[in-house]
């Protein structure tokens, strides 16, 4: 991989939570980080916070479901850098009203569609738009923020040692969107397997953020480590895998 100071990364949902911390840690490695957020005031404030810590970050507006904004950002990255080394598809949502073991009985089409728009269709569209720029980088890295909740093995594992924690926690829309994102990850990794680009799915852990909640055991500084490690993989690193802190997870 090129020297880290030569790398340019785009992180979506970078104004708070894991996206903000991932931007901080990548910038601390010397990477120039384009921090994307859907509200200018929020992303500008987040970027200013990291700049005041001495990091090289640039704010950008991106509502990830907006095709025109994707195209505008693609053009800007092309004009400013001519390539993109790292894409972290981090922005994601969970619709809280559909928690619980009965989610699957009641989940409505609107909630499913909204979740899939942000967690699946948007990262696919953004990745497709940016792939020509990633192909211009010496060693592109694509990281899709998945979740252990997207694992079919874990979801079916209610009678399996180690997996039963998730027996009664099945937010259907979220889990299905992340399982589908995992499939996109594998398909893209397969399509790019003869290139220098690596594509992996990250499970950050259960992390204290607005999404993860206060009961989560992991701090955000540790939660960002999986995304950062996958973004900075060496040439001999994995592709087409589902990873948490260096450990491969079951699909
Ligand atoms: N925290 C966990 O325990 C955990 C576990 C497994 C996986 N993950 C995954 O990790 C990723 C980050 O999660 P997090 O915990 O950091 O969540 P978070 O604190 O809720 O932050 C979510 C980020 O996504 C952005 N976002 C949501 N919808 C968007 C849209 N339509 N366009 C642009 N940005 C949008 C939010 O922007 P706004 O501020 O504008 O809403 C925010 O920046 C997600 O993909 C999540 O599924 C998290």
Image (cartoon, rainbow, N blue to C red):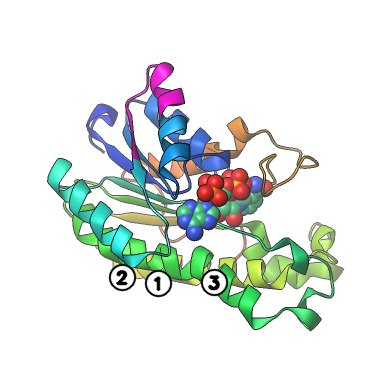
Asked whether, in this view, residue 51 is left or right of residue 111, the answer is left
Residue 137 image offset from top left, x and y in percent? 20, 47
Residue 89 image offset from top left, x and y in percent? 44, 54
Label 1: which secondary element = helix
Label 2: which secondary element = helix
Q: Is residue 54 magenta?
A: yes
| Range covered by the magenta-colored residues | 48-59
Distance between the alpha carbons at the discs numbered 2 and 1: 6 Å
Q: How many marks?
A: 3
Q: Disc number at residue 18?
A: none
Residue at the front extreme of this rendering: 41
Distance between the alpha carbons at the discs numbered 1 and 3: 18 Å
Mark 2 or mark 3: name the one nearer the start of the chain: 3
Residue 144 image offset from top left, x and y in percent? 47, 56
Asked whether, in this view, residue 131 is left or right of residue 79, the answer is right
Q: Nearer the viewer, residue 241 or 83?
A: 83
Residue that appears at 41% across and 17% down: 52
Asked whether, in this view, residue 130 is left or right of residue 214, the answer is left
Decide: is 130 above or below 19. below
On the image, numbered disc 3 is attached to which residue?
116
| Quarter of the image where the C terminus is located | bottom right
Q: Nearer the viewer, mark 1 or mark 3?
A: 3
Residue 67 image offset from top left, x and y in percent? 33, 66
On the image, numbered disc 1 is attached to which residue?
187
Label 3: which secondary element = helix
Q: Nearer the viewer, residue 124 or 61?
A: 61
Q: Nearer the viewer, residue 157 or 47?
A: 47
Residue that appears at 72% across and 65% down: 154
On the image, numbered disc 2 is attached to which residue?
191
Mark 2–mark 1 CB contact (< 8 Å):
yes
Q: Nearer the viewer, mark 2 or mark 3?
A: 3
How many other residues sit within 10 Å of disc 1, few (<14), some (14-19) or many (≥20)? some
């Amino acid at each position: 991989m090129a020297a880290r100071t030569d790398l340019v990364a785009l992180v979506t949902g970078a104004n708070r939570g894991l996206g903000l911390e991932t931007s901080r840690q990548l910038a601390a490695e010397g990477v120039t980080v384009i921090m994307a957020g859907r509200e200018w005031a929020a992303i500008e404030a987040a970027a200013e916070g990291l700049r005041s810590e001495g990091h090289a970050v640039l704010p950008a507006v991106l509502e990830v479901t907006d095709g025109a904004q994707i195209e505008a950002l693609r053009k800007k990255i092309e004009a400013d850098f001519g390539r993109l080394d790292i894409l972290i598809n981090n922005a994601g949502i969970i619709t809280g009203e559909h928690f619980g073991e009965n989610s699957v009985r009641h989940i409505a089409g609107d909630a499913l569609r909204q979740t899939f728009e942000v967690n699946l269709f948007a990262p696919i569209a953004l990745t497709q738009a940016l792939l020509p720029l990633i192909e211009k980088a010496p060693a592109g890295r694509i990281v899709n923020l998945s979740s252990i909740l997207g694992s079919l093995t874990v979801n079916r594992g209610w009678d399996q040692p180690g997996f039963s924690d998730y027996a009664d926690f099945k937010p259907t829309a979220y889990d299905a969107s992340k399982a589908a994102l995992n499939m996109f990850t594998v398909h893209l990794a397969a399509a790019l397997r003869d290139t220098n680009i690596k594509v992996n799915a990250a499970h950050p852990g259960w992390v204290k953020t607005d999404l993860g909640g206060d009961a989560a055991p992991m701090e955000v500084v540790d939660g960002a480590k999986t995304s950062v490690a996958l973004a900075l993989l060496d040439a001999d690193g994995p592709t087409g895998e589902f990873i948490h802190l260096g450990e491969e997870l079951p699909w």
